[in-house]
Image (cartoon, rainbow, N blue to C red):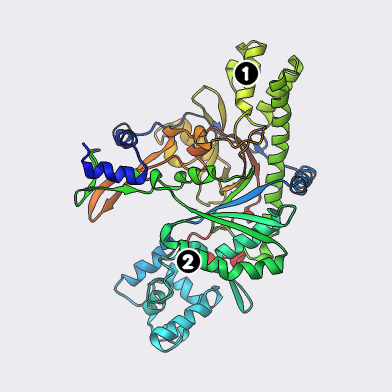
Amino acid sequence: MFTNEDLKLLASKGITQEQVESQLNRFITGFPYLRLAGSAKAGESIFILDTEEEEQAIARWHKYLSNNGEVTKFVPASGAASRMFKALFAFIDGDTDTPKPGSDIEKLLKNIHEIAFFPELNVTVNRLYGTDVDTLISQGKCRQVIAAIVLPEGMNYGNLPKGLLTFHAYGDTTRTAIEEQLVEGAQYASSADRTVRLHFTVSANHRDLFQKKLSAVVPALEERLGVKYDISMSEQKPSTDTIAANVDGTPFRDNGSLVFRPGGHGALIQNLNDISTAVVFIKNIDNVVPDSYRGATIRYKKVLAGKLIEIQDRVSLYLDMLNTGKYDIEDLRRMITFLHKELCIRDEKMKHLDDSELALYIKNKLNRPIRVCGMVRNEGEPGGGPFIAYNQDGSTSPQILESTQIDPENEEYKKMVAESSHFNPVDLVCYIKDVKGDKFNLLDYVDHNTGFISSKSLHGKDLKALELPGLWNGAMSDWNTVFVEVPAETFNPVKTVNDLLRPAHK
C-alpha cells in the first residue's frame, strides 16, 4: 500500500506505518457512539456552590498560590480567524455592493464606529482608496470597506489568528485577544513571586507574528500590572496529523503524495502533556472581555481553581491512607461516598468487592488527572454538554460530549440531550500531577474510540478526514471530572465579527 516516498513522509512526521493503517481502518469501521446514563443535572452532578462555598474555594486558591503553588494558563490559539469573517468573504464574492436588509454585513456597517478596530480600518481605507470609511459607505462602495478588513492588501484579518485581532478599545488605545489573555492571567494565575505563566499553542506560519506582538506589549504590561510574564509557545505536532482517505477508505493522494490533515484540537493533549506545572487553566483565545466586564470571570476562575485544590486535598489524603495501609472499613466507606458525591463516579461492581479489592479499585479511580469544568446554563449558545457516560470498565462518570459522540437515532439519548440544562464553555482548571509530585502521562488517559470522521474536499475531490478525540472530550475521558455551574457572563466568545458589537465587548 505504501511506497518508499510514503514511508519517508511518515518518518519525517514521526508517524508509524501501524498508526496510519489503524487510522485507515477507522474510515471503514467508524467510531462507536458513547453509551449514556443521563445528562448531568444541576445540584447533583453539576455543583451549584453557595456564597460561603465560593468564598471557601477562593480562599483555598489564594492559599495554594501563597504556598508557592505552580500554575500555567494554557490557551489554544492556533489557526486563522477565517470562519469569524465567513459572511464578509461571501459579501465580497457576491455581485452587489448593497448589503441585504437585516444581514450581518448591514449590521456591521451601521455600527462600524463602535467596533474596536475602526481607527485601524479608517487608516487602511485611506491608504487603499484615498478617503475614509464613512465616505465609501455613503458612496455605496460597501464591498471596498469589507475588503479592507479581510483581504491581504488591507488589514488581512481574514488570514490572521484570532489572538492578533483587535478586540477591545480603551479610549485611544486598543487590545488584541492575546493582550486580554495576558491581563486576565495576571488577575488569577499569578504565583507568589508575581510570575504569570502562559502557554499559547500557535500555528507555525503565525508564530513570528505572535512573538513580535508579545515583544511589543509585554514590557508595558509587566510594569503596569507589577508581574513578570513567563510565556511559551508550541505548535501542533506533525505526529498528530491524520491521513486523509478517499470515499472508499483508501489513502487519498494529491499528485501521487499521501495527504495528511491536522488532527483537530484533540492533538493538543500532546502539548498539554509537556506543561510542567501541577495546575493548568484552559480557555479559548476568543473568550475574553475588557477590564470593566471581567469581575465575574476573575471570581469564578478562582472558584473553579479553589474547588480543584479542595478535591486534590481529599484525593491526596485518601491515597496516602491507601498507600500506607492506614485505613479501616469506615475510611473506605468515606472514600466511596467521595467517589459518589464529589466525583460522581458509580459502579455496581463495588458492591461485590472484598475490602482489599475495594481498596485497589478506589486507589485506581483516585490516582489520575483531575479537571474542574465550569458549566453555563443553556441560553442558545453552541457547545458540547455535560453528561454522565459509561466507561469501558462499566463505571459511569461525568463527561463533556459533543453531538458527534451521541447516537442521533437513539430516542432515549435524544431526550437526554433535550433535557440537558447546561453547555460547555471550555472553562477548565486541571491538576496533572500525582500525589508524589510526578507528572501524569496524559496520553494514558485518552479514549481512542471517541474520534470522529468528517467530509472534506481538496481541489474539488471529496475526501474523508479523521479528527482525534477532542481535547476536553475523549482526550480527557479517563480523568476525574467535576462540573461546577458558572454564570453566563463568564462566557463571551467571539465566533463572528459581529460578536464584537455585543455589550460585553464594547
Q: Is residue 224 above or below residue 124?
A: above
Which of disc 1 and disc 2 is earlier in sequence? 2
Residue at 79% across, 43% down: 56
Residue 442 % position (x, y): 53, 37
Confirm whether residue 245 shows in the render.
no
Between 245 and 344, the one nearer to me in the picture:
245
Identity, as a three-letter code, of the amino acid under mark 1 = Leu
Q: Is residue 124 above or below residue 495?
A: below
Residue 110 % position (x, y): 49, 76
Task: Provide the residue designation for mark 1.
Answer: 360
Name the residue at the bottom extreme: 130
Residue at 43% across, 82% down: 125
Task: Provide the residue designation for mark 2.
Answer: 209
Quadrant showing the C terminus: bottom right
Q: Which mark is residue 449?
A: none
Label 1's element?
helix
Residue 62 % position (x, y): 76, 49
Q: Is residue 30 above or below residue 121?
A: above
